[in-house]
Amino acid sequence: MKKSFAVMTLALSVTVVAAGCSNNNNNGGAASPTASSSASASSSASASAEAKVVKMAINNTWKPFGFVDDKDELAGYNVDVLKAIDEKIPEYEFEYEGVDQSAVFVGVDTGKDVLGAGSFFKTAEREEKYLFPDENYGNIVMYLAVKSDNSDINSLDDLVGKKLVPLMPNTSNYNIIKDYNDAHPDAPIKLETIDNVTTADALKWVASGRYDAFLIPGMTYYDTQKDLNLDLKLTDAIQTNPIYFVLNKSETDLKTKIDEALKELKADGTLSTISQTWMGEDIFK
């Protein structure tokens, strides 16, 4: 069944966060003004009246995974993957709402949204609260962004005693540092948190010497650096993680159908093509 999508903009709200941030959020955290955008996209009414309408919450603050484009439309890798899945599941009609990272979890927790998309890693804590598909929908390679002349930092061990850009709780890079600290209680990395930050601001803070390093996915770093051209470099890869959608615990049928759809979309090359479009690389290799 072919479906066409009409995008409805909810609102653009600008929030000043203390010590705060700005645009192009990276799932990390620090301080300066931040633009928080919210938008929703929904399947058209041409879908079968028998299809069950379900709502999807998408983090719209992390380009290229999810963001509000210059037409005020919800766009990105997560959006296109879910649209491709929806085409495979005629029993369901997906509606999309763009929200910030914390609101993704709130929506799934309360049942307002059946699924959350924020390029999430699986963790034991999350698996207690949410239903994860068996199939991932990509991989993220994490690096440390440091000043170009910095030869002292090339691994997480090297961050002990250094200043890491503060990170947002319940995000992928926050959990990487938390897991490291749990495994190294005698020599932990100083882990500070913040409500929000943009990739651009975080990288600028490292380039200025305000912080020593920032934990960031490679594709997000390159997407931001092409505009900023800061005096920075990436370390060796820190960690490679598969990413998953999270579902409300009650959505067992939808979880099964998403797994089936993801298997087909991987096998026929659709997800690799979407990945090339948004990431400039095949994140399934």
Image: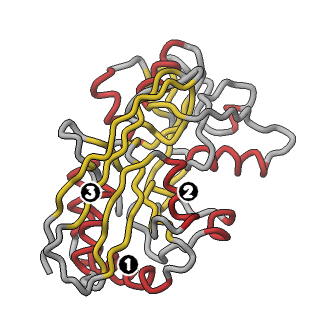
Query: On the image, numbered disc 2 is attached to which residue?
Result: 106
Q: Which residue is mark 3?
A: 41
Q: CA distance from mark 3 to mark 1?
A: 19 Å
Q: Tag 2: residue type?
A: Val
Question: Could you tell whether 25 is left or right of 206 in the image?
Answer: left
Question: Could you say where residue 59 lies in the image, as x and y percent from the top left?
Answer: 42, 50
Q: Which residue is mark 1?
A: 258
Give neighbour class at mark 3: few <14, some 14-19, many 20+ (Cα, 10 Å).
Answer: many
Secondary structure of the residue carrying tag 2 is: helix
Q: Amino acid at mark 1?
A: Ile
In space, the residues marked 3 and 2 are separated at their CA atoms by 19 Å
Q: Residue at x 62, y 24 (%)?
A: 152
Upstream in the sequence, badge 2 or badge 1?
2
Q: Which mark is residue 178?
A: none
| Residue nearest the viewer, comparing 111 with 177 | 111
Find residue 222 and report its image quarter: top left
Q: Is residue 119 above or below residue 173?
A: below
Q: From the top left corner, tell me how far across and down residue 268 is, in percent.
A: 21, 76
Instruction: Tell me whether circle 2 and circle 1 mark residues in contact (CB < 8 Å).
Output: no
Query: Residue most toward the right?
Result: 186
Q: Secondary structure at mark 3?
A: strand
| Residue at screen point 34% across, 28% down | 225
